[in-house]
Image: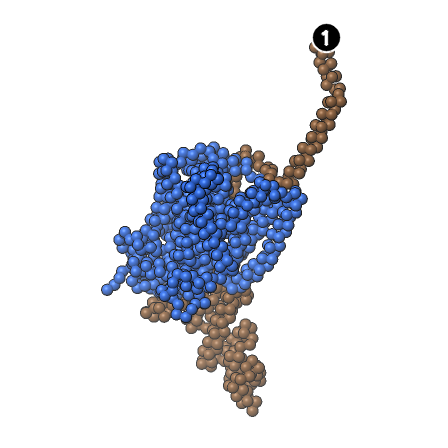
Chain colours: A brown, B blue
Amino acid sequence: MSKKKHLKKIELVEKQTSPIAKKHEKTYKKGDRQVNKTIGQSVINGFLFGDVQLPGLQFLIKYPLLFTVLPLIVGIVVFFYAINASDVKPSISLSEELAKAQAVLNSEKNYSNKEEFNKELLEAGNMIKNVISKQPTNAKAYISLGVYHINLKQADSAFYSFQKALELDNGKSYISQNAHNYLLNSALNYGSIMIQQNNFQNVVDMVHRALRFHPKNEDLYSMAAYAYYQLGLIDSSRIFYKQVLSINPQNKAAAQYLNILSN
Amino acid sequence: MLALTGICIYMFSLSFIFGIMSVRIMNMMFKLTNDRHLPFTIQIINGLAIISIIVSILSIFIKTSLVTSVFLFVVSLIYCVIDYSFVSKEINKIIGSFKIVSLPGAVLLIVFISYFFLLAEMPSTNYDTNLYHSHLVKWHENYSAVPGLGNLHDRLASNSSWIVIAAAFSFSFLDIMSFNPLSHFLFLLISFYSIGGVNNLFRKNFNASNWIRSFILPITLYSYFFPHIGWVATPSPDVPTVIFTWIFFCFAMQIIEDKRSLQLNTWTISLIFIALFVMTIKLSGALLVLFPFFVFLRELYLKRYISALMVPFLVIVFIVPFLVRNVIFSGYLLFPYSAIDIFSFDWKIPVEKVKEMQIVIENWAKFPAWFRNVPEGATLDNMTFFQWYEVWLVNQTMPYLKELLTSIYVLSSLFIVGFIIYLTGVFTKIKAISKHYQENKEKMLAYVVVITIAILSFLFWLIKAPDLRFGWGVIFALAGILIFLPLQMLINMLMKSRAINFPQNAQTALYFLFSIVALYLFFSIYGDMRNLLEQRKAGMGSESYWNTMYLPPDYNISQLELEIVNGYKVYYSGTSGYSPIPSNNSRTSKKVFMRGNSFQDGFKTIEKE
């Protein structure tokens, strides 16, 4: 028999499937199905019970350094992205500058030499203005600026600074609380100075601005009522004294003035 | 939030690289052959320990700023390139063992990562961070170790490698803010470690170490989210001391379960690393140093003299930078312990001040001013130990503390009694006990060593400085070991006798139920935490919350006053926070002078007559 014929015969034999072969074939196929089922089941089991190797790790095994260097770079990229994406850019040096300026403003009693304090005060003012120029939305800086103006006895400028702080903070935090208190005090302070200088129109203007933030403060209404009276605007004065009494019915001075105006 | 996430990813990968370096160092020093890879968390802690040594040494000579950060980054890359084959092998070992997290584990992972993002929006809840931690970090960012810094304020002489690491990862040189990622990093670390324990339990590995690891999960949440403990956004050394103490004892149990002894290998040496690292963070973790001492004695007993000598060498490498910095800051080897007084530098803090500080720390822990239920006229001096203990216990705020401590006392006593009975059985050659001893000698010794160190650490805490925040670590570690070790033995006995054999469906149901419970707990606690966050935002002020999606809240700076002391300006406030240098928490003593023209030259106290 030639080699070719011999090979053909072998092929034919191989093609024939004896019952035994068929049985094994079925088993093999059944085994395939079983193997497939086992893989699927094991993935589910692995997910439920945590017992199967994570897929896709072969890539990392080929390039192991990716496992270390890549997270290092990802961390740096995420970090710098966060810094650049942030709308507000804080600054350590500016925060420090502001803190130093505030410390000077709070420390007049610690200076033995008035001239030295005045010099430091002016420097503190420049530092605060520098912070504001670089961080125009820094509400805390505006409060410091207001306190600076109070130290320089510039109540009007102080008032505007506190007003700005309130607008920037918008009542979100303790800054607003502080700004409210400072604003009220500087308005009253300014009002007192203007009254001493007989500059009553300025008093009225200031009180109206302050009332936006302190609509129920009897001292502001009292001050405005007096200023209106001095300006000869009796009706307005009467209205404001009535307002004082509606806030504090026990206010004897307001009741007395109202009585006088009514008569 | 994103910025902190980036820093944490960076810290994890840097620590991982240095962790592989630590394995290489261990193999070289102790002549070890290739061992199974270390668990991922342990690798990270080893790496962090190496980083702490490097930054502590550098901080003696240069400020912890740009150069330090660049140095760490460059060294890690160079190491990866130079030792490429070893690094690849180690990574392949770790990758090969990575498996899918189980469903309960995956749910817990999502829950805890969500809490991480919530934490990233919160400012510090730790009182001492405003008192001196943040200011100390600032000193490290701007100056190398300043001689006699403790003269300015005794708290500034508190030397901890954790504060130096805080400065190394604050990236303040970018002049944006001093980032404060460490407590967030630790939260992730302990979460991964503990969830690994949950995972193993659901893989039917009921070893005690897995129980203890899982048990630590709810305690971690409690620690971070209840403000009187103050773990959020703080570089406080209390947090890593507690967390690494937990990990030390869990890992020790894991080693004994896996290797049935504490024989020298990379795993045991990692325990030495952790013990020494904790000691350089806070002295309240000092007793963990008994473990390296045990290893040293064991190696001597086995006549492996070279390995034995490597242990004190490791101790020297860890402890010497710590001691040198102590001497620079205060003039004493250990601060505030004036007993070891061997130097006479001009910047040394006066000994009376050091003794006073030691008494203040101990007395504050034993009998703080905030105790309310105090018998009339009672003081520390006129009470016996048991009288004091009653008063101390009544005034603690942690729920069920009395029950927890009672169980520790009872179980520790049972352990000691049981051990004595066992030893008696061995020496009197009772057959069953002697046989058991012969088969399990190393394992028994290992358990005895670990439990003894835990009990001694607990007693040290109770006697010296029983403030809960110092003892949080050892209390739960010891309670965990004493409760779960017998539990493990019981379950293993039942499993062997096939008394416990869950059918597959019951297991699946159990896992789904666990996941639902975990999700429920998340949503119920999440609501409370969001309210807490809103309250803090309102209280702290908008400038402390720049833009929490991208940047975290900054350290606080209080309203300062300025005084001029002996020719230099000092800022002060009740709690100075991250205030300009130099700052103090009270008025500076008129006896404190600068040693030179710059703050880097340091400070000294001159007792004027």
Label 1 Cα neighbours within 10 Å, binned few <14 / some 14-19 / many ≥20: few
Residue occupying image coordinates x 42% and y 69%: B375
Q: Where does residue B246 sit, x and y in percent of width and height?
A: 47, 49
Q: Where does residue B418 sit, x and y in percent of width and height?
A: 46, 47
Q: Is residue B388 visible?
A: yes
Q: Residue at label 1?
A: A1
Identify which amino acid the numbered label 1 is placed on.
Met
Circle 1 marks a residue in which chain?
Answer: A
B130 left or right, relative to A261:
left
B194 left or right, relative to A108:
right
The front one of B226 and B481 is B481
Residue occupying image coordinates x 38% and y 66%: B379
Q: Where does residue B344 sit, x and y in percent of width and height?
A: 26, 53
A122 left or right, relative to B225:
left
Residue occupying image coordinates x 51% and y 86%: A252
Residue occupying image coordinates x 75% and y 21%: A18
The front one of B301 and B580 is B301
Q: How many marks?
A: 1
Local SS, label 1: loop
Q: Is residue A236 visible?
A: no
Determine the residue located farthest toward the top in the rendered image: A1
Q: Where does residue B184 sit, x and y in percent of width and height?
A: 50, 52
